[in-house]
Image (cartoon, rainbow, N blue to C red):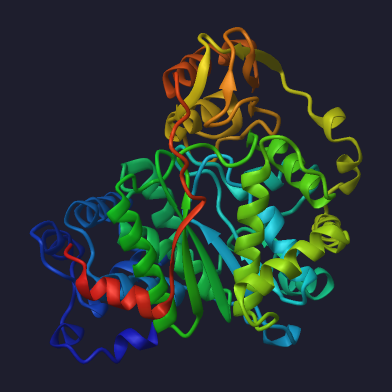
Amino acid sequence: MNDLKKAPDKSSSSPLHTIDLIRKKRDGGALDAHEIGFLVAGAADGSIPLEQLAAWLMAAWLRGLTVEETRALTMAMRDSGEKFSPRGLGKVAVDKHSTGGVGDKTSFLVAPLAAACGLAVPMISGRALGHTGGTLDKVEAVPGYRTTLTLKEFEAVLAQCGASIVSQTPELVPADRVLYALRDRTGTVESPGLICASILSKKLAAGLDALVLDVKTGSGSFLRKREDAEYLAALMVATAEAAGTRTVALMTDMSQPLGRMAGNWIELAECVRLLRGERPDGSEDLRELSLRLAGWMIHLGGKAATPEQGFALAERALADGSALRVFLEMVAAQGGDASVFNDLTGFHKPGATLIVEAWESGYVSEMDATSLGWAVQRLGAGRERSGEPVDPHAGIEFHARRGAHIERGQPLATLYATTQEKLAEPAALLKQAIRFSATPPDAVPLVSRVFSRESAEAYLRDAVR
């Protein structure tokens, strides 16, 4: 917290009180870096009660955070604990982060793809939040896989494999561990400033040279309004660039689940099929987006002159099996039983299964991905309270995607649950979430916009918040 002691404003010489900062934010005021640093330090060391942190989060959610507040919050959270340095690896460190979606499993593809192309990918990931799945919950479907590594172990896996997917250590960004859990329990998730600070504090604490952001738009995104998602994308790019990390943000479609599977193990299995070079029905959007994200990572990491050349290198790593080898090596290096991938269907043992048939004929015109995400969660693949266990085998397999034509009585989706009793509510949610039409819906681009530093800063200058 040394930076905060150097703050030039007058408030740095007078005592701060949490209740005053809550009132200030509640009444529409903007907190300075010293005040935000005080709150972050209190979250990290437990000196501020959770109810006061929750009250400040709600005030921030209602009033919004300025660009300056967001930057100060991000840096203070980044500096709230230990930081990882990838310098000893001798490679450029690059990562990808998604703002969250349903069936969003690109991490298991882009990390090995970028590592196979000579980059280091130190990926610090999170668990399920709200209606969206969590990378850690998914990878922990592999028996024995350890997501909690010390920073020394993290570095060793990166040196061996080039990629590592882990959780935050207790020492790394401790303030975010507290605030992240509170946001999920207090209805304060959907705030651009809070999302930006949470994501970037972890990424910047990993010592990244470059970062590719996947900002979701559409029915399954946290920020349903297009302008809110664009603001978040620009805010994150500008904030990360100000911290010295080369960053781009891709605005990507989440008007339906990504790929064919939504759950835990079944998403991993879908990714391994793609890493093997297979092209399963319903997984083409997942393959395309993963290659595009990896292409940008490879470009920003200096291994390709353009993102298009990076795409080609990633596709080659997919075709020659090198990305699959990285993935399996990473799983084994972190204690996981990689042999489970020898029989992808045999390992999948859900407690109960239900096939939902199409209740009318026509084109699948709408898939409310948020409702489908809650269906996945209530099948047992997610959690309602922090710390709850998840079922690795729960989830949904979609047999028809948006734009597909289906006849009444044909299988639309298969639900996998912990128990038979958990099938009814998700089945009802699925039927509410999917609509049919006599004509095909308009196509939605997979990637609709890319923000660079220049375009992000220009957007923020013109944005009215």
Q: Between 170 and 30, which is closer to the camera in this rendering?
A: 30
Residue 21 at what x, y percent from top left?
17, 65
Q: At 42% from the left edge and 54% from the top edge, which residue is drawn? A: 180
Above or below for 300 versus 393: below
Q: At 52% from the left edge and 32% from the top edge, which residue is drawn? A: 402
Q: Between 308 and 238, which is closer to the camera in this rendering?
A: 308
Q: At 57% from the left edge and 22% from the top edge, which residue is drawn? A: 405
Residue 413 at what x, y percent from top left?
62, 21
Question: Horizontal placement of 145 versus 412: left or right?
Answer: right
Question: Horizontal placement of 206 versus 227: left or right?
Answer: right
Q: Between 22 and 264, which is closer to the camera in this rendering?
A: 264
Question: Horizontal placement of 192 versus 261: left or right?
Answer: left
Quadrant holding the C terminus: bottom left
Above or below for 305 versus 192: below
Residue 422 at what x, y percent from top left?
57, 16
Task: Farthest residue to the front: give it.
Answer: 439
In this view of the protein, can residue 435 be seen by the observer?
no
Residue 454 at what x, y percent from top left?
37, 80
Above or below for 80 versus 332: below
Quadrant holding the N terminus: bottom left
Which quadrant of the figure has residue 138? top right
In this view of the protein, can residue 107 be seen by the observer?
yes
Q: At 23% from the left edge and 57% from the top edge, which residue is drawn? A: 60
